[in-house]
Structures are given as C-alpha cells and as structure tokens.
Image (cartoon, grey):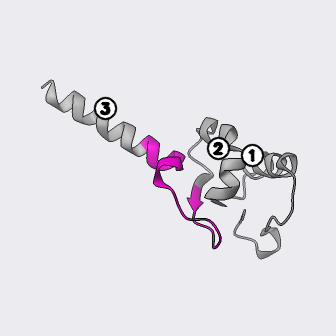
Amino acid sequence: LFSSTDESSCYAFVETTVKQVEDTFKEFTTREDIAIVLISQYVANMIRFLVDSYNNPIPAILEIPSKDHPYDPSQDSVLSRVKYLFSAESVASDRR
C-alpha cells in the first residue's frame, strides 16, 4: 500500500506488476506533497533494491506488515539502518 495525505492518492496494489510498483515508488518518492510513504513489507520486498537504495529523509519510507504476510524485522531497511547506526555509535563510544 502506498499512501499520501490526500485520500485520492491512496493506492492499493492488487495483481500489479513489479514494474508498476517500481514506477509508483519512484513517483511517490519524488513528489513534494508526500511526507511519508507506507509500503507493506511484502511489496517492499518486490522492489527491495529501490527501497534499500533510497536515502532521502523526506518522504520517509515506512514498511508495515500486511494482513497476509508476517512482518520480518530482518528485511526492514529502516530497522537495519537504525541497528547499523547504533552499532557504529556503540563502537565509537567504546573508543573514548
């Protein structure tokens, strides 16, 4: 599910192609009127290379569980980055 603040811009993907998901992700991450992109982890896994390479702070990408697929924290790109930052910070603080 991709979402924006405008209800008319809320899209649910049912039987869509990976290309359509890629194009919509690229569109939503370049729009200035969108602050957060909600995407189910299942759909994010379809375009994992795009989600993992996205590094702008706005719009923020938030992976959420879907009704039919369990959430896997090891697949979440945001959680992985946070863990990396905390581990790097921990290493840096140990050197002091």
What's the distance in space between the residues labelled 3 and 2, CA to CA? 22 Å
Q: Which residue is mark 2?
A: 51
How far across and down, in percent of the image, does residue 47 sit?
72, 45
Q: Which residues are magenta?
A: 62-81
Badge 2 crowding class, 10 Å Cα cut-off, few under 14, some 14 to 19, many 20 or more, is many
What's the distance in space between the residues labelled 2 and 1, CA to CA? 13 Å
Which image quadrant: the N terminus?
Answer: bottom right
Residue at 47% x, 54% y: name it: 73
The extreme top residue here reads: 95
Does residue 90 lie above or below 65 as drawn? above
Badge 1 crowding class, 10 Å Cα cut-off, few under 14, some 14 to 19, many 20 or more, is few
| Secondary structure category for the residue under label 2 | helix
How far across and down, in percent of the image, does residue 35 sit?
63, 58
Q: Which residue is mark 3?
A: 88
Does residue 26 lie above or below 72 as drawn? above
Q: Which residue is mark 1?
A: 30
Q: Amino acid at mark 1?
A: Thr
- Using the rendered view, name the quadrant where residue 6 is placed: bottom right
* Dots 1, 3 in contact, CB < 8 A: no
